[in-house]
Amino acid sequence: MRFANFWLQLVVIFLCLKKHQSTKPANSSYEPGTCGGCSHLTLKVEFSSKVVENEYIVAFNGYFSATARSKFISTALKSTGIEDWRILPRNNPASNYPSDFELIEIKSGQEDGVLTLENHPNIKRVTPQKQVFRSLKFVDSDPLTPCNETKWSQKWQSSRPLRRTSLSLGSGFWHATGRHSSRRLLRAIPRQVAQTLQADVLWQLGYTGSNVKVAVFDTGLSEKHPHFKNVKERTNWTNEKTLDDGLGHGTFVAGVIASMRECQGFAPDSELHIYRVFTNNQVSYTSWFLDAFNYAILKKIDVLNLSIGGPDFMDHPFVDKVWELTANNVIMVSAIGNDGPLYGTLNNPADQMDVIGVGGIDFEDNIARFSSRGMTTWELPGGYGRMKPDIVTYGSGVRGSGMKGGCRSLSGTSVASPVVAGAVTLLVSTVQKREMVNPASMKQALIASARRLPGVNMFEQGHGKLDLLRAYQILNSYKPQASLSPSYVDLTECPYMWPYCSQPIYYGGMPTIVNITILNGMGVTGRIVDKPDWQPYLPHNGDNIEVAFSYSSVLWPWSGYLAISISVAKKAASWEGIAQGHVMITIASPDESELKNGAEQFSTVKLPIKVKIIPTPPRSKRVLWDQYHNLRYPPGYFPRDNLRMKNDPLDWNGDHVHTNFRDMYQHLRSMGYFVEVLGSPFTCFDASQYGTLLMVDSEEEFFPEEISKLRRDVGNGLSLIVFSDWYNTSVMRKVKFYDENTRQWWMPDTGGANIPALNDLLSVWSMAFSDGIYEGDFTMANHDMYYASGCSIAKFPEDGAVISHTLKDQGIEVLKQETIMVENVPVLGLYQTPSEGGGRIVLYGDSNCLDDSHRQKDCFWMLDSLLQYTAYGVMPPSLSHSENRQRPPSGLGVLQPERMEGNHLHRYSKVLEAHLGDPKPRPLPACPHLSWAKPLPLNETAPSNLWKHQKLLSIDLDKVALPNFRQNRPQVRPLSPGESGAWDIPGGIMPGRYNQEVGQTIPVFAFLGAMVVLAFFVVQINKAKSKPKRRKPRVKRPTLIQSFHQTKTPSV
């Protein structure tokens, strides 16, 4: 009995020790103290940048020696009169090689002649040199945060800032998909991300990343770090005389990719090439990156990780170099940014078609709240954005190498990026024919093998969660081909195909635009043969839809676009149902093996299309969103609508109903409205089809023809709702900004909205906004409201209804730092035009209550009431009988804003063009004309459900068998729609993972089982010895053992 108790106590002690070890915090170079007395900290990384005075990057059309570059610049500057200039030395490993750029310094007062450099035939572009700052800050966090976890977030100065509370684990940090709820238990166990993604299966096959060159562009790495055994080269591109990492971020990233012990990386035998591009003061320059990129091309790097990004997709030298890198077969992996959960917040270069853009999830497969969302925004307003991110993976609580040893847990998409980079490095080492591996084929394998997360849309998860083993299977049976992202278009599949699935299509509506990315795994360049073919399925009513195409004339590097416009045929104006068909597209690419003969290789891809058609809704339920007159950064300085957002001055989210006005769009759809987007001038839409034109935060000017047409449209029954914002020239001068793309302080080109242009548009109805700026809380119709840097109504017709409130004069506060309350500020006006059958006009002075970017209190209820008024002419009693209703202002004594003298709006405007005097309107552009593809009908039956894993051509997964030494691992298989991507593991283990937690519990159960068996035999032996013998009667001790045994249940 005592012996059995001893063994049971030993088992309990072992389990306690095991639990203690699993929760013990790892050593970290970041923590200021031990866990016992540590304050719970969050590690924030902030990015900002500014232009370097008097320094310019001169980009050439090719690679030239230093002597040739100097001659080109000298020749180009002779005609400009610039004499005081010099070429700045760049002492780095790339100095001895030809280069495609030079860094020059030009003394103050001579900058005007700089752009004449571009007249030289060998000079491509001249741009200012940029200085990039990155700051690491410790701030207090939620006390429930485990001591061994540090939240890593990054923010550019021009990005949407993350509030501290959003980083707290206790305040809804994760956007849950309802998959698991036992987060606290999982957080208690440190996770080895490589084993979680089953890299150990490939390790046991002998693949460990050998002979693969992977570059880490970061803060460096110490020479004798114990975690790395194959650091091939460390290079310093900064102005500091050290190669070591003084911050720890570069060490962590390198560890996730290639650590060989403790917190193991994916590819421990890979060749690490460390590029130190940030100083210990967290400073970098564009020229450092350009030189380092050139050196990476020279060194024939295979994989490059870049865990930085920003919103400026027009930073030409940087973007051009990224394209050149991938064109030279460098697989670039980059983080999409930490600006979530707002949509339209993708960072560059991860938003590029040839770059693998990575988003973040937690270990419960929930999309991280901080992870940026799609769509891409540079196609706006005329087109539509593309699907990004490409893939998501673990970015929360990921363990990596500490600066001097030990392990550290960090979070952010800058952590998810090296997870994918490490996986890509490992995958490259598994391929026998390395010539098959390129940026396109690797992306094809990753997205075709990704596991879709349930309840998450395409702009949050891309193609889904990284699946390393399935990617290995696909990559090792891969044949060069083209593919599409996304691989099908199903406007009926929600929520994955949001926003396409959120609204059916109908005759007379604006065409639905789907922007498809073409990936060309056959070569760095390619073309579309002839034209895409539209083949409707007659049994599935495919002839009820019409399709038009727009596409890249050349696919380079490795990719291009295919924009598909989908509309309903006239014969289906009253029809309801599902229509299906497919698009066939053939890609041609030069055959590398037979370049001398000019031979090409071809790949034909099918794009299934499925849409839901309904009868055309009534006019009163159709709302037209004006996208054409919205402008955003880049390229110009368009300030935020809320002046309180001093650390986030730029309006860069696109102002689209599917980006920063997403919540408003969802609300309107839930109320039964159909929202369409106008990406062309007012002269290009049929106003008789729509009940209300919704104009929110317009920054663009208006063509005279637009003003005339809108006046006629309103007279014929179209209603107009305008949400404005602030515009005050004195305040605009106060919030001047040192722009990253010019070398001077300059004022905004508009305010929050272009009120002078809006006043020109509204003047025919005797309406106008003022230049006042107001802020404050108030109550309207029993709803709490917040007015955030809005303007007031300066002039309104006498027979209209105006609502006023008491607000603070924010303009005075900004200019004089004085607080003045103003009574009876007109904020809302409603007006019925006098013509018979005429429409109604509504003005409101602030759009922040609709904008997701910085909204504090929404006004969706008010928008509902206003749409009821514009559609049916019924004014809500809460407004018509409001105690805050006042007599409409006549405009006397109220200043109306004038356009700021010397503004540069014409540089970015689609309406204005430069003149010797004031900018003048351009000629009115022609309306977009779609050329509908000739249908080639097919008498085929389509599948009822289009979703399945992307199946690349000529791939047989059965030929690439996984090892059989782990029979307990579940088999990889395709999932059905809505099914979780979890492994089906018996025995009650947490689904969705076969990771280190599970691996660590197996020895525990084995030890426990062994102890139980041993205790059983001990008891049996003692029982046998306890039987009484004839010659020697037993003492009482055996009787105790006997009685103890008899009291045990038979199940033991």
Image (spheres, grey):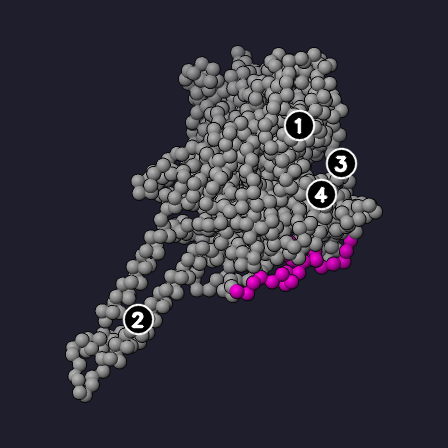
Residue where numbered disc 2 is placed: 1015
Q: Position of residue 733 (x, y in %)?
A: 54, 16
| Magenta stretch holds residue 955 | yes
Residue where numbered disc 4 is placed: 524
At horizontal 31% and vertical 74% (from top left) the residue drawn is 1017
Q: Are marks 1 and 4 in contact (CB under 8 Å)?
A: no
CA separation, marks 2 and 1? Answer: 76 Å
CA separation, marks 2 and 3? Answer: 84 Å
CA separation, marks 1 and 4? Answer: 23 Å
- Nearest to the observer: residue 536 or residue 438: 438
Label 1 residue SS: strand
**Mark 4 belongs to which amino acid?**
Val
- The disc at residue 192 is none
At horizontal 42% and vertical 62% (from top left) the residue drawn is 1002
Residue where numbered disc 3 is placed: 929
Q: Answer with mark 2 or mark 3, whichever residue precedes in sequence.
A: 3
